[in-house]
Amino acid sequence: MILRSAHRAATRLFAQEGEGRIEDRTVDRVQVARTVLGAFATIALVLAYNVDPNRWEDAAWSGAAQLIVAPFVLMIAAPLVIIGFIYYAPPHLRPHLRSRLRAPLKAVGWYVLTLVVIGGVLVPTALTVDANDGKDWWEYALAVASLIVIVWGFPFFFMASLYSARSAFNSAQVHPMLPPILTVALVWVFAAFNAIGDGMPSGPPIVQLCSTLGGPLTVTAVSLWELRRMRTRFGVTLRA
């Protein structure tokens, strides 16, 4: 019941596709298949080249960290992409696109508010937990609030991060093509971070190259294919 409530709230706030939503089950299936095949390819490389077992733990932590960090990267990168997107649109469409920015901005606001509330509850709790004096009423209230944050707030934050990264903060409400474009920008930012932070993986040069660039290139290819399907099957273009 608690998880269902958190999921329902996160979906309502961060998974709004808007009136112009393009439902393409073929694209959805291809995206799932790409994700599954990418995971199997990663496992095969780790097993084939006897990578340090700690690599499994590092990969798991890296995936979880990217999920949490993705919304923050989007908050930094998305405005630049959206500004360029609107600038590229015909002049008569720009006011319409700008008027639809309210939905992404509201999603960003809710996400930041979630962080503020979680931090505003847990930080004071951590500062008072070691106190040896008697408890005041507000300390008991803070303890109850902390329990609510842990039981309901953490699942909500996790799902909010997942949906924010997937929907790019409801950017489809501005234009249906924005989510795949932002996905491409996001995946290449993470690829650069991983290359700088972790370096090249083990194996021959061709394997290192495929391991480093395989994910970003396949995500880019699927996103470009999705954009093409929007244009050819649904008549959606960047300038209309």
Image (cartoon, helix red, strand yellow):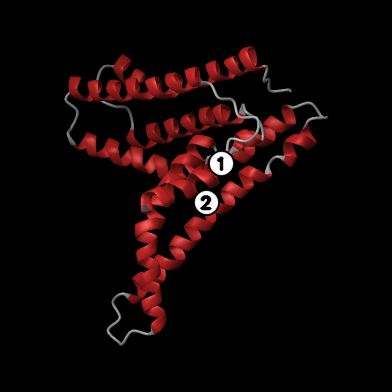
Q: Residues within 10 Å of mark 1 (few under 14, many from 20)?
A: many
Which of these two is toward me, 6 or 214?
Answer: 6
Question: Earlier along the polypeptide chain: callout 2 or callout 1?
Answer: 2
Q: Residues within 10 Å of mark 2 (few under 14, many from 20)?
A: many
Look at the picture and state if 206 lies above or below 82.
Answer: above
- Taking the spot 42% from the left edge, 80% from the top edge, the residue there is 138
Residue 21 x %, y %: 60, 29
- Taking the spot 30% from the left edge, 17% from the top edge, the residue there is 207
Do we see residue 87 in this rendering?
A: yes
Which residue type does callout 2 highlight? Answer: Tyr
- Taking the spot 52% from the left edge, 51% from the top edge, the residue there is 111
- Taking the spot 29% from the left edge, 20% from the top edge, the residue there is 41
Residue 70 x %, y %: 46, 41
Look at the picture and state if 46 lies above or below 130.
Answer: above
Residue 231 x %, y %: 64, 16
Look at the picture and state if 240 lies above or below 76.
Answer: above
In what element is the residue under mark 2? helix
Badge 1 is on which residue?
169
Quadrant of the frame with the C terminus? top right
Left or right: residue 74 compared with residue 197:
right
Left or right: residue 185 compared with residue 92:
left
Badge 2 is on which residue?
111
